[in-house]
Image (spheres, helix red, strand yellow):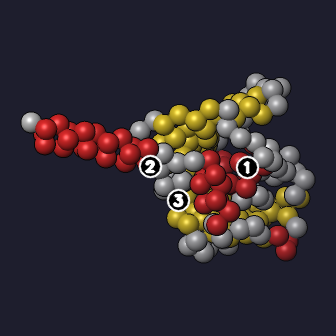
Amino acid sequence: MKTLNRMLIATALVATSVHAFADVTWDAVKKKIADGKSYSFEYKYEGPKGKQKIVYATVVPDHIRSEIKESDDQAKVGAVVVYDASWKQVRVKTGGGLITRALDHPEVRDSALIKPMFTLILDQLGAGNKPTSTVNEGGKTRFEFKTGGGRYTVWARDNGDISKTERIDGSAKSKEVRDIGTIQWNNNPSTGF
């Protein structure tokens, strides 16, 4: 009987310790981002710019490619936006041809069109911002932050990949959500047309 009890206790301890090691820390998420020289993924966006499904690729920090696969604004479907820092502008290829936008254009400024997505997220959180709460949700960890008058929530998989973000701007009361698919790290993706 003692052997059985010891086995049950040992099993419970192993199960508990495996679960504890599965949680990801915010420092591990930030390290993964810092170590990423390039990455690509598909994500769904919902916010002030509508609803879109986008294929995103970056070679950090100077090359970014975004392609709109789906949108509630059908005129945007198929648009490819390319940023190359040497151009000092973005170029947008649509069915109607090639359009350029200055870096301070309202649709471009402070966006993932000219700043790598994960760098943008960290910048939006603010330098040195630490989560106000951390909750394990079985395979994902939810980090909540206060940002000015708003709130920012980041979900990360146990491997440290960000899987979802939700940003609520306190002043504008606008909500922006990104659901991020599988991330391919350091894959040197194509960032051209």
Classify mark 1: residues with Cα within 10 Å, few (<14), some (14-19) or many (20+).
some
Classify mark 2: residues with Cα within 10 Å, few (<14), some (14-19) or many (20+).
few
**Vertical side of 43 occupied by 141: above or below:** above
Tag in front: 1 or 2: 2
Tag in front: 3 or 2: 2
Left or right for 56, reference 99:
left
Count of marks placed on residues? 3
Tag in front: 3 or 1: 1
Q: Amino acid at mark 3?
A: Ile
- Residue 68 in view of the camera: no
> In whole angstroms, how far apart are the C-alphas of marks 3 and 1?
17 Å
What residue appears at the point 77 percent right and 34 percent down from the top-left corner? 147
What residue appears at the point 66 percent right and 47 percent down from the top-left corner? 75
Left or right for 149, reference 19:
right
- Sequence-wise, the earlier of marks 3 and 2 is 2
- Using the image, tell me which numbered label, if any, was put on residue 183: 3
| Dots 1, 2 in contact, CB < 8 A | no
Residue corresponding to mark 1: 122
Q: Looking at this view, is 146 or 81 the one in front?
A: 146
Q: Looking at this view, is 63 or 27 the one in front?
A: 27
Instruction: Give coordinates of residue 153: x percent, y percent.
Output: 63, 36
Q: Amino acid at mark 1?
A: Leu
Residue corresponding to mark 2: 21
What residue appears at the point 60 percent right and 65 percent down from the top-left corner? 39
Q: Quadrant of the C terminus?
A: bottom right
